[in-house]
Amino acid sequence: MPFNQPPPQLGDQYQQDRVLRTYLRRALPEAVLAAIEPELENMGRLAGGELYQAQLADRLNEPRHTPWDAWGNRVDLIEVTPLWQRAEQLAAKSGLIAAAYERAHGRYSRIHQFALVYLFTPSTDVYSCPLAMTDGAARILATCDNKALAERALPRLTDRNPDTFWTSGQWMTESTGGSDVGISETVAKRAQGQGANRAWRLYGRKWFTSAATSQMALTLARPEDNPAGGKGLALFYLETRDAGGALNNITVHRLKDKLGTRKVPTAELTLDGTFAEPLAGLDNGVRNIAPMLNITRTWNSVSAVSYMRRGLALAADYASRRVAFGAPLSQKALHVETLAGLQAEYEAGFHLVFAVVELLGREEAGEADEAQLNLLRLLTPVAKLMTGKQSVAVLSEITESFGGAGYVEDTGIPYLLRDAQVFPIWEGTTNVLSLDVLRVVASGRVLETLEVEAETLASAVREPELLDCVRQAQNALTHAAKWLEGVQAEVLEAGARAFAMTIGRATALLLMARHAQWLLDHDGDRRGCYSALIFCRHGVDMINEDVVHTHARGLMEDHSH
Ligand code: MFK
């Protein structure tokens, strides 16, 4: 018999997730954990079992767009994959949106929701994408003054019944790009005598509409005669089909041929007189859609850490089965060193993201003070940009850790890396978010607030080797604050990414150290210390004063040589 390598196995994704389970024990009151644990156990079992098997079996399926029917009618039918159909049902039944709005556990409700999302996401082929936008739309509807629209759509977006559950799109990106939203070209014209939901008609082309199968969307358009720029845009609500099921003057041109997230039916479409209704006045569209972006960015961050966790679960299992040079890889020092480095990066991302989730839950429960609101505004883009980058680096190494098998499609490994590449791009690139971080910091005493929070986290730590991590994290924050003072504008912009990463890595390290101390105190478990120490060794302070921006300018000045 020739040799056949046993493939990696995935077990119960809740029971086997030490990081999630110890975090929940620390962060939640016992009664809340006891109440939500059966749901987490169920999702963990499904994610590592039935859903994972269904995902492997579904590998070659992709969504299909049928523009015309046999008789020449334009139908623009989009069929999603079998796993996506199942994921939609499961998402509704499991309350992946509802949990955040029912608020059964007060300020812990976002932890409840996102712990489920984190387990669900890597086994459902980025169905988290329409869910993220649905959550963002629900947040806007729940907080806007438009009672009629809120009453119509919010109960559907937060429904637990799959038959009546709606998802929402966020149709923002146009062919002018996804970053500089203020230059969007879609125009809005008043529609005469059309009644509710039909007061305006939109004309334009939307270029990256990932939830093309959703029942509604929030979108931006410029009311006629409004000025240029983001202030001249308005936020609109639209339903994609009328009561008879016909598309609302929307033509789907094609689905994108993307590097990853292949199961997501991302479409290019034209709005040609699409009926819509303004949600929050007739201007300040960018400001008004920003709350949605902050929610989708949080989903992006949770998804990024969930992908890292999935890669590590598979790689660690494989290392115990794969024997080479006389022993399983799990006993080889260099392999262990490599996986531990990835584990430490993932744990850092996990703690940073769930700190954002906690703050979001506090905000929505009306229990956040001004300092916590500032931290939420700062750490939302920081967590998104840091985990987006980490996920690509970690999943590239994970792919390599399987050797050639990691490069072969039907092992089910390569899609992780391809999908991960969307995390730094979707919902704001690393650079765009880094500039957002600079704006947040310039808007008030946000860094001082972070330094106070750092002090609080540091005060929870006693273990000597963790104290060194804490010192390095606090020094990095002090250095970042000092660097900002008096730095020339172009150097400030050039250094924005290093600055944002320093904020992210230092905050993550402090959160890790606090958790590690808790783990030591409660379980005598040193693994939290090890991950903090390894992460700290990778580097926290990313600001390099010696980098002179004129070198970059000089190097990139002329591309022809
Ligand atoms: C899963 C499958 C995926 C398929 C593939 C996907 C591929 C990619 C598809 C995409 O294109 S995703 C792209 C998503 N795009 C974004 O997330 C937007 C990225 N750009 C930004 O975030 C820019 O910073 C921004 C558009 C906001 C800049 O526009 P402006 O017009 O220069 O806005 P400005 O002046 O910075 O902010 C306008 C207002 O909004 C300000 O408030 P005021 O009017 O009161 O001064 C800001 O404070 C506020 N604001 C901006 N960002 C905010 C915010 N408020 C709260 N939170 C924020 N994050």
Image (cartoon, rainbow, N blue to C red):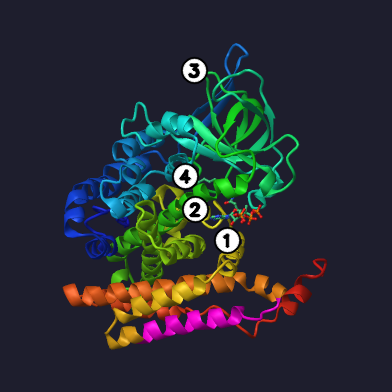
Note whether residue 318 is visible: yes
Q: Quick one: 514 or 527, which is closer to the camera?
A: 514
> Which of the labelled discs sits on residue 243, or is there none?
3
Note whether residue 335 is visible: no
Quadrant assignment, res 172: top right
Magenta-colored segment: predominant secondary structure: helix
Name which residue type carries label 4.
Gly
Q: Earlier in the sequence, mark 3 or mark 2?
A: 3
The magenta span reads 468-488
Q: Quick one: 381 or 388, which is closer to the camera?
A: 381
Which residue carries the number 4 mark? Answer: 136
CA–CA distance between discs 4 and 2?
Answer: 8 Å
In what element is the residue under mark 2?
Answer: helix
> Which of the labelled discs sits on residue 294, or is there none?
2
**153 inside magenta stretch:** no
CA–CA distance between discs 3 and 2?
Answer: 32 Å
Q: Is residue 401 left or right of residue 25?
A: right
User: Could you tell me residue 286's position as x and y percent?
Assistant: 61, 48
Q: Is residue 520 left or right of residue 434?
A: left
What residue do we see at 38% from left, 83% from top? Answer: 469
Q: Does mark 2 have its CB less than 8 Å from ligand 1?
A: yes
Which residue carries the number 1 mark? Answer: 433
User: Could you tell me residue 67's position as x and y percent?
Assistant: 60, 24
**483 inside magenta stretch:** yes
CA–CA distance between discs 3 and 1?
Answer: 40 Å
CA–CA distance between discs 4 and 1?
Answer: 18 Å
**Closer to the observer: label 2 or label 1?**
2
Q: Residues within 10 Å of mark 2 (few under 14, many from 20)?
A: many
Q: Residues within 10 Å of mark 3 (few under 14, many from 20)?
A: few
Q: Earlier in the sequence, mark 2 or mark 1?
A: 2
